[in-house]
Image: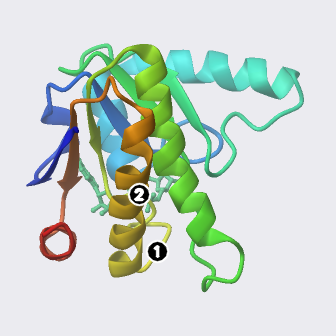
Amino acid sequence: MAEIEINQGDITKFAVDVIVNAANSSLLGGGGVDGAIHRAAGSELLEECRRIAHTRREAGTEPCPAGDAVLTGAYKLPCKGVIHTVGPIWYGGGRGEADLLASSYRKSLLLAQETGFSTIAFPNISTGVYGYPKEEAARIALETIKKTLPHTPGIRRVIFVCFDEENYRLYRTLAQ
Ligand code: APR
């Protein structure tokens, strides 16, 4: 069974196989962890995201719908790849937010497995700009990863990288 770790820090510094980005559906960057990842990766990451976004819009779909996940290179980052996922915006819980958040974690882990990665780091998806209540988001994140790991035998290590103190405390309490 894979190890699950709770760390505090800046996800762009983690030299794991793949880090997960809390992106938006345009895939064209933003603030928060999305901004930090693009800054650290350099402009080639945005160029690849632009190509993916263009191809998907040509095919009539959003570059990355909420709950979905897209893989790119990592460029100047110390990891080997970046999985961009789009968490739900919190509207109060009545618009399927919990299922979409779970889907973001599940699809990112399955995509890492399919790509042959064995170590992955997640940020606390949707708990910043998107306003998802942190405790509920932490519970969904841990529960979804634990439920998905039996289907991803290649994954040996999952790290939850908490940036703020509150998330760090919540994850450590819930992961016990
Ligand atoms: N490393 C790890 N976690 C980070 C970092 C970092 N360098 N910077 C911020 N975070 C944390 C935030 O503290 C928060 O707990 O990432 C978590 C997710 O917050 P956001 O980055 O705001 O992401 P989210 O809430 O999913 O909103 C996504 O914000 O940046 C835009 O383009 C993005 O539109 C999208 C929206």
Q: Residue at x 38, y 67 (%)?
A: 128
Position of 14 with respect to 70 (left or right) is: left
Q: Is mark 1 within 8 Å of ligand 1?
A: yes
Count neighbours of disc 2 (C-alpha within 10 A) and say few if under 14, some if 14 to 19, many if 20 or more: many
The residue type indicated by label 2 comes to Ile
Query: Hey, which quadrant is residue 6 in on the image?
Result: bottom left
Give the mark nearest the N terminus, 1 or 2. 2
For disc 1, the marked residue is 132
In the rendered image, residue 4, in percent from the top left (x then y), is placed at: 18, 48
- The residues tagged by marks 1 and 2 sit, at their Cα atoms, a distance apart of 8 Å
**Circle 2 — which element?**
loop
102 relative to 50, above or below: below
In the rendered image, residue 154, in percent from the top left (x then y), is placed at: 32, 23
Please identify the quadrant where the N terminus is shown. top left
31 relative to 154, above or below: below
Query: Hey, which quadrant is residue 139 in on the image?
Result: bottom left
Q: Residue at x 32, y 13 (%)?
A: 75
Q: Which residue is drawn at 50% across and 46% down?
A: 106
Tell me, for residue 125, which label it has, or none: 2
Please identify the quadrant where the C terminus is shown. bottom left
The residue type indicated by label 1 comes to Tyr
